[in-house]
Every structure is written in C-alpha cells, then in structure tokens.
Amino acid sequence: MLDVLDLHAYYGKSHILQGVEMHIGAGEVVSLLGRNGVGRSTTVKAIMGEVPPHGTINFKGQNIAGLPSYKIARLGLGYVPEHRDIFPSLTVRQNLLLGVKDTRHPGKWRLDDMLDMFPNLKERADTAAGVLSGGEKQMLTICRTLMGDPELIMIDEPTEGLAPLIVQQVGDLIAEIARRGLAILLVEQKLSIAMRISHRLYIMGHGRIVFEGTPADLKASQTVRKEWLEV
Amino acid sequence: MLELIVISTLNGVLFGMLLFLMASGLTVIFSMLGVLNFAHTSFYMLGAFFGFQISRWFGFWPALFIAPVLAGLIGAAVERYGLRHVHKNGHVAELLFTFGLAFAIEEIVQIIWGKSPVDFRVPPSLDFPAFTIFSTNYPAYKMFMLLVSIGIFVVLLITLKRTRIGMIVQAALSHPHMVGHLGHNVGHIFMMVFGVGTALAAVAGVIAGPALVTQSNMAGLLGPILFVVVVVGGLGSLPGAFIASLLIGLLQTFAVSMNGSLAGMFGPLSPDYASTWLSDIWNVTVAQIAPILPYMLLVLILAFRPMGLLGTRES
C-alpha cells in the first residue's frame, strides 16, 4: 500500500534521511522505532510533504512525493503529528468535524461512535479543546484524523509525555484501529505498544533503516536492541 | 458638553468600525499567512477610487457592490500569483513584496486619476440630516456608514463562528499545516481569505471615500493608524483588533474635540509657568496632540504588553 524507496530529506545542509526504504501492506501494523534524532519523525513528515522529499513514495500505486499535503490526505493517508496540534479555540466536537474531508461522503467513523468510545471527550464535547489534558488531546488528534476515513494512518509519538495509565489507553485505541482493518505506521521511541500490536518493526539509525523484522525477531536479537534502541 | 459627548461617541464608533473593517482583514491575513500586508490600505484606496469611477458610470449603489468585488479579485490574484511564489523565499521577501505593491498601487492610481482629490460625493439619496441632537445635524450618510460596517461585522462574526468554512479558517489561524494534513486545501483557503480581507478594506474605502477625501495619498495616511490598531489589539487576534479599533476611534475623536490644556487645568494655581520655557507644553491643547495619541498608545503597549491587548504571541 505504501512503498518508500530511497527517500532522502534535508534540513538546510544537513542530510537527515539517507535513503530510507519501507513497505507497508494493506491492513498491516508497522512500527518505526529508533533513538531520538535518527529521522523517524522526519520520515513521516517527508511522506506528508511537510519536509521536501527526494525519492519515490508510492501510495496505492501513485507517486505522492512532492504533492501538497491536502492531496495526500485526500488519497487516504492520515497523519497524526507528534505535537497534538488540536485547534484550541474550537470545541472538541468542532475539532472532530474538521477531520471530515467531504461532508457529502462521511466515512465509517462516526462522530457519535467516537464520543461513545471516549466518555471523557463526550463529557467535554462542547468545551474548547484547548483545556483538555495531554492524554485527551492525544485521543482527540487520533480520532480527528480517523474522521477523515484514512486507509493508512501514521501516528507520530502518541505516548510522549503521557502517564502510564494514559499510555495504556492510547495503546488500546491503536489496537482497536488495527482491529478495524486500517494499516498503521506507528512512530515510537518506547517499545511497549509497538511490541504489543505490530506485525512488523523497522528500526532507524543515522537516517537509514538498520533493522526489519517481527516483534519476535527483535525480542530474540539482543545486539540490535543494544546497538540501536537502548540508551 | 453632553452634545459633545454624544456626537464624539458616534463619530468615534464610526471611525473605529471603519478601522475594524480593515484591521479584521489585516489581522486574519497575518495570522494565516504570516504576512503583515503593507499594501492593505492600498486596497482601501482602490475601493475608494473604484467606487468613485463606478458611481460615475452606474451610480453609487452598484459601486458599493462592484468596487469591493473588483478589489477582492485583485487581492486574490495578488495572493495566488504573487505572494504564493514569494513565500518560498521567506518572510522578509513577503514583506518587501507587499511594501512594493503598496507603492505600485499608489503610482498606478496617480497615473489614472491624478494626484489631486477626485470629486467623490455623498449620493443625493443619503444627503440629508438623519437627526438633530441639541443643535447639531447628524448626517444620514454617517449613519449609513455606521450601519454598513456593523452589518459587515455581524456577517463576518456569524460566518466565522457558525459555518464550516469559518471553522476551517479559525483552525488554520493557529495550525495551518494540520489543516492541510486533514485534507483541506489550505492554499485555496489562503487565497479566499486574502480576497475577502482586501474586499473588506475596499468596502471601507467605498463608504469612506465620499465622507473623507479620495486622493492618491489616502492609503499612506491611514496605514500607520491601522498598524497601531493591529499591534495594540494583538497581532492575530480578531477580538483584540475589534477592541483596539474602537479604542483608537474613540480616542482620536474625543481628543480632537477637547480644548483643555495643562494651563487650563492648573493655570490659576501657578500662573508663573506660562512665562517660562515650559510654556509650550503648558499651553498645548489636547486637540493639538490628538494625532500623536495613537502612537503614544502604541509605544506604551509595546513597552508594557508587547503581545498587545489580547494577543497570544510575542512576535
């Protein structure tokens, strides 16, 4: 479904991505792991066109490298950025409704289902989203992107800075998304959720993919964990 | 005294609402595109001149609608074919672009209509006194200006708060990238906002043209005050722009109608000052310093509350 071939990206003169290769099939749950600063977030930003990509990015058979992000989103690629960019002055409900791309063709995720899934959000449906807690904001951003009915959703660092109990809830939500058949690219630093839900894992180091395998493979290979993940 | 207060309040609110017609567009454009549009008052001027020309050909009422539409289309084209390409080169390039555009528009207006004021008059259907308070006849045209600006304010508010387009615009004010990632065409929204913003400035031009002077330097005259409004209100804050517009409108109209001076207030206590080197400060009237009051307010705001009254960001 998504094939990233020889992807390069630059911030000014520094060469951040140095030929990333990645493949995600329909309905597949894939995690992208690695230490801070190895280019995980830059990879998804380059896929969405927020950082200018150099290389080939095929999504459903079409090269999307360099397309404006709204066109990429409209093809069915959802993106949840790491900073939980909720719209603070709008209400929770309005935030969710803005996730819908085309009001004439609503997708399979309905506003009421979302609110039923998260009693916290339902309670605050009509308050400004700016006052939500970090965990609620994270749920809201993921749900908002789901409202646009993506076929593949890329989630960048969803558990960063959250309490363990909330991390558990975010993990449950991602597992639920996977259960409903969406393909997921999860970008994480921690292993917990990734090991629990992923079919396959990629590990990045110095702007390249340095390991590809199943959670079981990673569990077996202590050297990989030691060299590329543990601090 | 009461008469003065009533008339000054009306005039102040009127001037404030006219300022808001422009400040609202300027501040929305700034928040979304990150560009302080130096050419914004040029669109106000274009509105006035288009209004003048079209009212000669077809009358004032068609002009009131056609002139802002024309100016808005020009504004949208400026964003689509100008700013969007300059954007790649950063904010300084964008600022210089709008700065140059302001000069270009002024020169073009001078080539077509000349340097001296044109004869843009209040339409006869509105050229009568609306009411008389005490001994002052308040012109109907001024009431008309007030109603038009309040009407537009209400429509703008409802559009922003109650429609889906308004929500997208509000969202794009703070997080334009995220709006794009959700599948909304941000470029298209920017162009529309630029068009509507410049059209609002042009509405202000058409209705202010007959009441003030329609001349090729009118953009330059209003520009500085408009920036004071936007900075005092807080860059990027619509409610802030509204409050600051009214504040400055009232401040200026009240100040010009006051003849008080320090000498008038405290003179009898120490008459000696009138003959010292302080006499200039001692005898200057509030009306005389009215034009600099907004700028003094600007300095105070920048010193004590740099983000403006209701602004959220420092830059």
Image (spheres, rainbow, N blue to C red):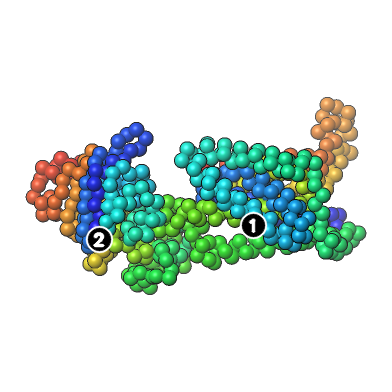
Q: Chain of mark 1?
A: B
Q: Quadrant of residue B269?
A: top right
Which of A144/B265 is in front? A144
**Residue drawn at the location 61% of the way across and 37% of the way down:** B100
In the image: residue B9, left or right of residue B244: right
**Residue drawn at the location 53% of the way across and 66% of the way down:** B163
Residue A45's x, y, as percent?
A: 33, 48
In the image: residue B38, left or right of residue B258: left
SS at badge 1: helix
The answer to whether B273 is drawn above or below residue A125 in the figure is above
Q: Amino acid at mark 2?
A: Ala
**Res. B12 visible in picture:** no
Which quadrant: the C terminus of chain A? top left
Q: Amino acid at mark 1?
A: Val
What label does residue A183 carry, if any? 2
Residue B88's x, y, as percent?
A: 46, 40
Residue occupied by mark 1: B69
Q: Quadrant of residue B228?
A: top right
Residue B304's x, y, as percent?
A: 60, 41
**Res. B98 visible in picture:** yes
